[in-house]
Amino acid sequence: MFCQYCSIPGHDTKDCRKLARFLRDNNVLPPTQPSMAPTVNTASTQPTSPWMMFDTGASDHVTPNRGSLHTLSEYSGPDEIILGDGKTLPISHTGHTTIPTSSRPLLLNNVLCAPNICNTLVSVAKLCKSNNVSVEFFPFHFLIKDLRMGAHLMRGLNLNDVYYAPIHPLPKINSTTTDSLSAWHHKFGHPSTKVLNKLLKIVGFNIKSNSPCSFHCDSCSINKSHKLPFGQNSFNAHKPLELIYSDVWGPVQRSIDDFIYYVIFVDYYSKYVWLYPMKRKSDVATLFPQFKNLVEKFFQTPLISIFTDNGGEYIGLKNYFHQRGISHFTTPPHTPEQNGIAERRHRHIVEIGLALLHFANLPMSFWFHAFQTAVYLIHRLPTPILEFQSPYQRLYNSPPHYAKLKPFGCLCFPWLKPYNSSKLQPSSARCIFQLNCTFRPLCFRVFAGAVL
């Protein structure tokens, strides 16, 4: 004698302690008396069984409990469930559910809901097809195996010559019915709580006072996730060069000077900007030491820290920063907002530069000269972030002068006599005014070419 459930000799299945413990843990008592009529084919209004039957002759999955189904929808077709004795049962709903196992859930698709049926009925044929499993029947139990791996997924019992498995109730958060808030929320396309509340009043849905229209939707949390706004910058600077923000802009259309990038260095204390054109991103490794030597010698103060993104052009300067005692701060991945000082400078420079180009009716190949002019002008514009001081005044402690400003792109006739090779050449020519030279005070840059 050996047990067909635990395969241990010395006792029968009805005396198996392991089986008794399994039934006790699931709070289920098996039928004690065999029934002459097949239980699965008996329609009744008695309480439904906590077991599900596995039937090789069933063509569909059937359940009396619509609350156990996902994505529940009403059934309005003409079909009915035909029992073995010829009786028919109406179908009220259809849906989907799962059977949890030790390794993966088994999917039950297109489950028919018949409130008058006693037991949950699992079609073995559909179970095997939709889950790529096999079902092996033994005298006192059955096994469900994964066809690909051969692993045992589930074990059931033969009770009164019918193969059963216990029903595991589904969490309520995963079940939806046509009269639930989550179902209406899904029907309306997952609107906000305020919008859903108004819609429910329109359709006449009764919202109980103890069940306010405020619930959690996993689908909304997963697919409507947004980046939270960033707080105020925690950095502070009390003097020039204490903190420098830097970023590279480009690539864009090649300029008349053969540049496609530019890099800016922004002093956090004064918001003053130094702009350098570049042909390659790697030029940052050459330009930053030049910028550092220039500003440190002019202002007689060391450059203390720099804030950049994680671009390779800056990471390559890691050893340079370390050797010269410069603190290098970088942004986390995909958070350009933390380098917002440089990003906003980019936007301001580009917007003003493009407006200057458009007004002067100049081609885009002049973008670098327009951007240089934009930086020159931004330095002289009062800004609310500096209590309506200009960056120039904050950095140099003296107000800027506006008397010699000229319109970008205007027509001009510079005196060219010293550059003539013949006394018969004209003293001037039609040229385009470009900008005030920041590196040569009281000088202007002009362009004479085919664009005229």
Image (tube, rainbow, N blue to C red):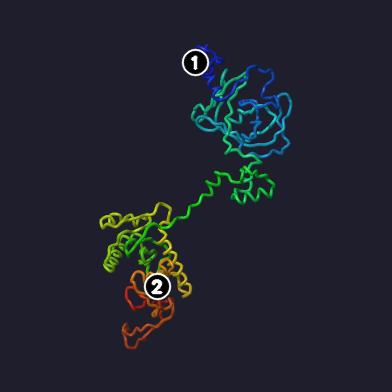
Q: Secondary structure at mark 1?
A: loop
Compared with 406, 394 (above or below) is above
Query: Mark 2 and 1 residues: CB-CB less than 8 Å, in contact?
Result: no
Quarter residue 57 falls in? top right
Which residue occupies the extreme bottom position in the image?
424
Query: Where residue 199 appears, x then y in whole percent?
Result: 65, 50
Is disc 2 placed on a helix, strand or loop?
A: loop
Structural distance between the alpha carbons of marks 2 and 1: 92 Å
User: Where residue 332 sits: x, y (%)?
Assistant: 40, 52
Give the residue furthest to the front: 209
Q: Is residue 414 above or below residue 205?
A: below
Looking at the rendered image, the disc whose residue lies closer to the viewer, 2 or 1, is 2
Q: Residues within 10 Å of mark 1 (few under 14, many from 20)?
A: few
**Count of picture labels:** 2
Q: Nearer the viewer, residue 270 or 362?
A: 270
The residue indicated by pointer 2 is: 380
Q: Is residue 370 visible?
A: no
Q: Position of residue 26 (x, y in %)?
A: 56, 25
Amino acid beneath label 2? Arg
Q: Is residue 84 left or right of residue 216?
A: right
Give the residue drawn at x 57%, y 39%. Answer: 173
Sequence-first disc among 2 and 1: 1
Density class for disc 2 (Cα within 10 Å; few <14, some 14-19, many ≥20) is some
Q: Is residue 362 visible?
A: yes
Q: Where's residue 7, x and y in %?
A: 50, 17
Residue at 66%, 36% in the rendered image: 94
Front residue of this view, candidates 247 and 194: 194
Q: Residue at x 60, y 22 (%)?
A: 163
Circle number at residue 8? 1
Q: Is residue 127 above or below residue 381?
A: above
- The foreground one among 390 and 287 is 390
